[in-house]
Amino acid sequence: MNIDKILNIAVVAGEKIMQYYNEDFAINTKDDQSPVTAADLEANQYIVNELRAETPDIKVISEEENLPAWDKRQSFNTFWLVDPLDGTKEFINKTDEFTVNLGLVEAGKPIGGVVYVPASGELYWAFNNKAWKRHNQQSTPIQTKTWQPAEIVMLLSRSHQSDEIQSLSRHYPTKSLQPMGSSLKYVRIAEGYADLAVRTQPTSEWDTAAAQAILEAAGGGVRTLDGELLRYNKKSIRNPGFIAFGDTDAPWKNILTLLNS
């Protein structure tokens, strides 16, 4: 696999998305009541076609494609998991907090990922257990930061907030509690900007795979609210609630106890 070509697929898809950003565009509603735009669909078509051409032996599952039936999908060992425009609501609301996500899954675990932020030009990726960021044509390795109780930066979904998070912030006083859209939350933890993100509202596997691969390669972790690893290619494509953290020595078990109480 040519990693540079994979990175370029995400970047070009982001450029296609940005062609719509400052224009008037139609907003349609999918069966699950989530919004979809022409930018989602054009980016999806480009990404899927390019991945199939570059890695013909690897299946591609995308949010904007029909999900293969479980009796076929359960036999997939290695596959791409794609969200061509993660954060469509943020895209529509012009917050700049939307991403292109390409996750590579093997045996239920994300082993590689690319997250591109079209509005800022920031590119994050991880393969072979190493995490990187490229911005302004400069590439640097990234890693998470040490948990420091007086300096916690907690991120929460801009579109989905919960009482549990407010309760958690009272037990673990934060230096900053910031709303943030899309998978951007998890790559911000990966690069050491933040410490913790909690998601109690539903997500789908394509929302998280790429960023989880990057966060784990940078030294962080992701656990479900039951304390288990967040796994992929489940019968239901929906994820359970989970927490993402930068320091694996952080008191994440205590945090789960508070969230489940």
Image (spheres, grey):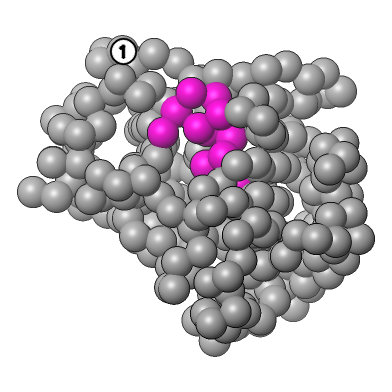
Residue 31 percent location from the top left of the image: 54, 86
Dot 1, crowdedness within 10 Å: few (<14), some or many (≥20)? few
Q: Nearer the viewer, residue 100 or 222?
A: 222
Q: Which of 80 and 133 is in front in this view?
A: 80
Which stretch appears magenta? 208-221
Q: Nearer the viewer, residue 127 or 8?
A: 127
Residue 236 percent location from the top left of the image: 43, 73
Does the magenta portion include 104?
no
Q: Which residue is drawn at 52% across and 80% down?
A: 70
Q: Nearer the viewer, residue 185 or 80?
A: 80
Q: Please state if 191 lies on the left or on the right of 249 as rendered.
A: right
Residue underneath mark 1:
148
Q: Please state if 237 lies on the left or on the right of 130 as rendered.
A: left
Does 23 appear above or below 255? below
Residue 132, image quadrant: top right
| Residue sitting farthest toward the left | 261
Label count reads 1
Q: Which residue is drawn at 66% across and 43% down?
A: 113
Does 258 appear above or below 209? above
Q: Which residue is drawn at 67% across and 17% down?
A: 141
Q: In which quarter of the image is the N terminus?
A: top right
For the question of whether residue 198 can be seen, the reply is: no
